[in-house]
Amino acid sequence: MPAWFVIFYEQYVRQHTQVVDIIHAKEMSEYASENDGHAVSIVEPHLNEENQEVHPVAIGTTTRNSYDPQSALRLTVGVFTATCNTPDHTHNFPAAIQNEGRSSAQQQQALSVPMTLATAHLRVARPTDNIAALLPFYCSGLGFQDLLEFKEHEGFDGIMIGHKGVGYHLEFTTTRGHTAGRAPTQDNLLVFYLPESDEFGAAVARMQERGFDPVVSFNPYWDRCGKTFEDPDGYRIVLANMPSPA
């Protein structure tokens, strides 16, 4: 079952209490108005014979269930089935709903689907001699977030940076007694494709405002389609103003 369906149903269930409260308050108010403000008997939420919570709404002397979890589930499964059986619609569900608030690993775990190389979360890890010196470049310049830090983990200190909910993050580690040194070449690159001109321009401007100017790329191809920046360890980032070719 795809991640968007699980998230959709979780959100549906999460929001039902709020919707029921709104309906309950509105109908009670309308009923009170129709009866010149006389008191209305309110039936509290209770458990039915199947041990499911029922939220009744008072309407005159009868009640009706505003929310039935089983009916909601049957309706949602029906929508899911219909969607999956409709050509060319399954993959058009908004990506924001598919991935909202979840990393790829969390989506797979929620669905109990084995993680494969095709869906695995990616960590790009490398050593450095000075983690603190890298943070202005990656966090202030590129806008990455500090996701996790650790110290004295079997002799290693480290930090993971990136953006919550996306399929990758970067990790920098250091260990006492070991020299990592600088990048072995000027062509060790991480490339970020930014095809929208406004987004590309904003990303380049942010880097320059933080004091990081572009450098001449080792491969002239990258100078034609973007801007290259070098971090304090000599590793390079390319902001490419083009769609990914792959």
Image (cartoon, rainbow, N blue to C red):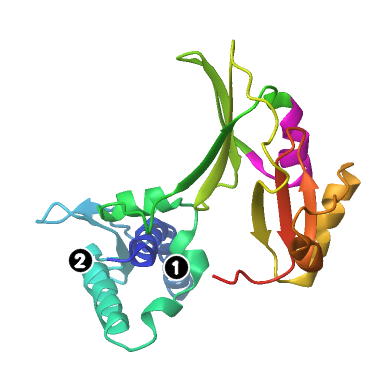
User: Is there any visible trace of residue 37 in the rendered image?
Assistant: no
Residue at coordinates 58% horizontally, 40% vertically from top-left? 170
x 22%, y 52%: residue: 46
Side of 243 where 214 appears, left or right = right
Give the quadrant of residue 32.
bottom left
Look at the image and give the residue range highlighted in magenta. 133-145
Residue type, mark 1 in image: Ala
Q: Is residue 179 above or below residue 86?
A: above
Q: Amino acid at mark 2?
A: Gln
Q: Quick one: SS at disc 1?
A: helix
Residue 140 shows up from this direction? yes
Spot occupied by residue 49 in the image (x, y as percentages of width and height):
9, 56
Do the residues under discs 2 and 1 have CB atoms within 8 angstroms?
no
- Residue placed under numbered mark 2 in the picture: 70
Left or right placement of residue 80 versus residue 225 in this view: left
Residue occupying the point 44% across, 49% down: 121
Q: Which residue position holds label 1?
A: 32
Residue at 26% from the left image edge and 52% from the top image edge: 114
Where, by quadrant of the figure, is residue 125 drawn? top right
Q: Is residue 142 magenta?
A: yes
Furthest residue in direction left, as rendered: 49
